């Protein structure tokens, strides 16, 4: 079954996915990169030029049209499981793993990140934004088949856990 990595932005989904691809010799798909390739625009530009609603609709269309091999790791966007019943779609297609990172660790990882479209507002209090959005999204993330506490987890630790799943 394909494995979908779910979690808040900065939780390490793409980084872990790329490392697991090398470590486990399996296919890795980054959903945001598939969207970027399809539209010929990077995610921040899609948000700026077409809006979040357009992005979420495209994300859903691409997610539901994925034809993944059994041993595939898919990194989703931080909001992917929160729209259009995407989480249930992913669970029908494979297993979902929530990479759970504490708000304090997320703040450390995101405070200097200028590539995340939802963080473009310079007036934003990042710590408050993370706390509020995480509170909204947590109910979707917790629907996952598995949860991995991921503040300081290594690729090797995730590899061991995933090997128990597949």
Image (cartoon, rainbow, N blue to C red):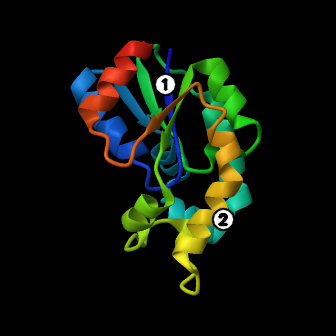
Whether the residues at callouts 1 and 2 have beta carbons within 8 Å, the answer is: no
Above or below for 66 versus 164: below
Above or below for 12 versus 111: above
Q: Residues within 10 Å of mark 1 (few under 14, many from 20)?
A: many
The x, y position of residue 10, in whole percent, is 43, 55
The x, y position of residue 149, in whole percent, is 44, 40
- Report the residue marked by disc 2: 132
84 and 140: which is toward the camera: 140
* Displayed quadrant of residue 164: top left
64 and 110: which is toward the camera: 110
The disc, 1 or 2, on the residue closer to the chain's N-terminal end is 1
54 and 112: which is toward the camera: 112
- Report the residue marked by disc 1: 3
Q: Residues within 10 Å of mark 2 (few under 14, many from 20)?
A: few
* Displayed quadrant of residue 141: top right
59 left or right of 126?
right
State the SS at label 1.
strand
Which mark is drawn over residue 26? none
Question: What residue do we see at 67% from left, 50% from top?
Answer: 137
> The C terminus appears in which quarter of the rendering?
top left
Report the Cα–Cα distance between label 1 and label 2.
Answer: 27 Å
Residue 59 visible in rendering: no
131 and 26: which is toward the camera: 131
158 left or right of 86?
left
64 left or right of 17?
right
The x, y position of residue 123, in whole percent, is 58, 87
């Amino acid at each position: 079954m394909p494995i979908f990595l779910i979690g808040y932005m900065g939780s390490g989904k793409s980084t872990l996915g790329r490392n697991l691809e090398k470590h486990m010799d399996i296919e890795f798909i980054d959903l945001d990169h598939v969207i970027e390739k399809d539209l010929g625009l990077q995610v921040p530009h899609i948000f700026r030029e077409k809006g979040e609603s357009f992005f979420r609709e495209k994300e859903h269309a691409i997610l539901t049209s994925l034809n993944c091999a059994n041993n595939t790791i898919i990194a989703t966007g931080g909001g992917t499981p929160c729209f259009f019943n995407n989480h249930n779609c992913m669970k029908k297609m494979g297993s979902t793993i929530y990479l759970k990172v504490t708000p304090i660790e997320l703040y450390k990882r995101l405070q200097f990140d200028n590539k995340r479209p939802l963080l473009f507002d310079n007036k934003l209090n990042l710590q408050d934004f993370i706390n509020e959005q995480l509170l909204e999204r947590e109910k979707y993330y917790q629907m996952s088949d598995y949860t991995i506490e991921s503040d300081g987890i290594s690729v090797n630790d995730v590899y061991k856990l995933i090997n128990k799943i597949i």
